[in-house]
Image: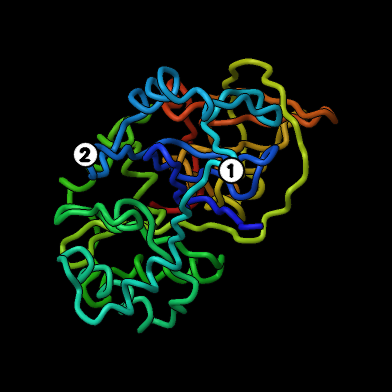
Amino acid sequence: MKTFLAKDFIQTREGLVFAVVETGLEQGRVLCFLRYVNKSGQWVKVDTEQANRLLADQFPQYRYFSPSKDVFLHAVSLDDVCHHYQPRRRLREIINVAKPNSSVIKDLIGLVGVLEAQGLPVSQLGVTGSILLGCHNSASDMDVVIYDRATFMTAREIISSFHKAGIAPLTVEAWQASFKRRACELTFAEYCWHERRKFNKGLFAGRKFDISYVAENVEEYPVRYKKQGAIKLTATIVKSDKAFDHPAIFVIDHPEIKEICCYTPTYTGQAEKGERVTVSGFLEQDEKGQKRIVVGSSREAAGEYLKVISHDQTS
């Protein structure tokens, strides 16, 4: 059976392309979110509202109630998958092309070359987003996926130095564009403070790129959660080794609630061990009584956030 990883794309016979949001399957379905629709032979990106409306009106078979998450999601059964786009395979195809056919592909090859020159194994890299689907244009960003935790951390170190060939920090304009795309519950100042210390994005040859970590070996076990309602609280992070995972996990010092679980990319890598945070999300409880707070219970995550309010590190 094929393995479907977060950041992969899958295509259905109807000309719909979904981004996989969680590694593995649930009841024979790939958990995902509609991102592109084929119109007159071209891929057109759809936003959250358009995606939800399209499935509700025309493709209800791809709306699925997840018993493990106690929420309606987009999901595609294995029988309905007609093509599986894999970031690692796509990058390999690009690198093997004798001559880049666009500026974005040329820049991607250049970025990968810099990372490889710094010791990163190309075998652990992939590319997702519009480049994965092949519908990129001259203004497209580069979304690099890394499948090894140590390699991902090394990539962050390379970005943090900002003096490697061609790599530079985001400009103010790039930060503003990034903030606008996220449409999150943080102020612009709060967003930038948190993002700048993550070192998971930058500019290469003037083009924005970001890196994300996807674990290939995820333990699959049937844990079912029930929503207990909205919650806000303040806590201290006691463990953050999975802060950049998908979903991101932050263990907290709370007598009843074990962890904060972030499905929204905005809050990946958001806090570090020892930091005091304030969180707004939904309280969930599993069948054994274990509780967690989920940030990103919906794609929009309206009213949900995770932010640092005190820290020992110097920003």
Dots 2, 1 in contact, CB < 8 A: no
Q: Is residue 297 visible?
A: no
Q: Which residue is mark 2?
A: 40
Callout count? 2
Q: Is residue 121 above or below residue 215?
A: below
Give the CA separation, mark 2 to mark 1: 25 Å
Q: Position of residue 175 (x, y in %)?
A: 23, 45
Which residue occupies 48% across, 66% down?
152
In the image shown, does 95 or 237 lie closer to the viewer? 95
The amino acid type, in three-letter code, at marker 2 is: Ser
Q: Is residue 314 left or right of residue 287?
A: left
Residue bearing mark 1: 79
Rendered view: 201 above or below 195: below
The percent position of residue 84, horizontal first and vertical second, equals 48, 54
As displayed, is residue 250 above or below residue 183?
below
In the drawing, does residue 305 fall left or right of residue 191?
right
Secondary structure of residue under mark 1: helix
Q: Amino acid at mark 1?
A: Asp
The residue under the point 67% across, 41% down is: 28
Sort mark 2 into few (<14), some (14-19) or many (20+) by Cα contacts within 10 Å: few
Quarter of the figure with residue 133: bottom left
Instruction: Residue 125: tell me if it is visible.
Output: yes
Q: Please identify the quadrant where the N terminus is shown.
A: bottom right
Question: Which residue does the image show at 46% across and 48% down from the upper left?
Answer: 10
Q: Position of residue 264 (x, y in %)?
A: 47, 37
Mark 1: few/some/many CA within 10 Å (<14, 14-19, 20+): few
**How far across and down, in percent of the image, does residue 44 sit?**
25, 39
Label 2, secondary structure: give it: loop
Q: Earlier in the sequence, mark 2 or mark 1?
A: 2
Residue drawn at (20%, 71%) of the image: 106
The image quarter containing residue 167 is bottom left
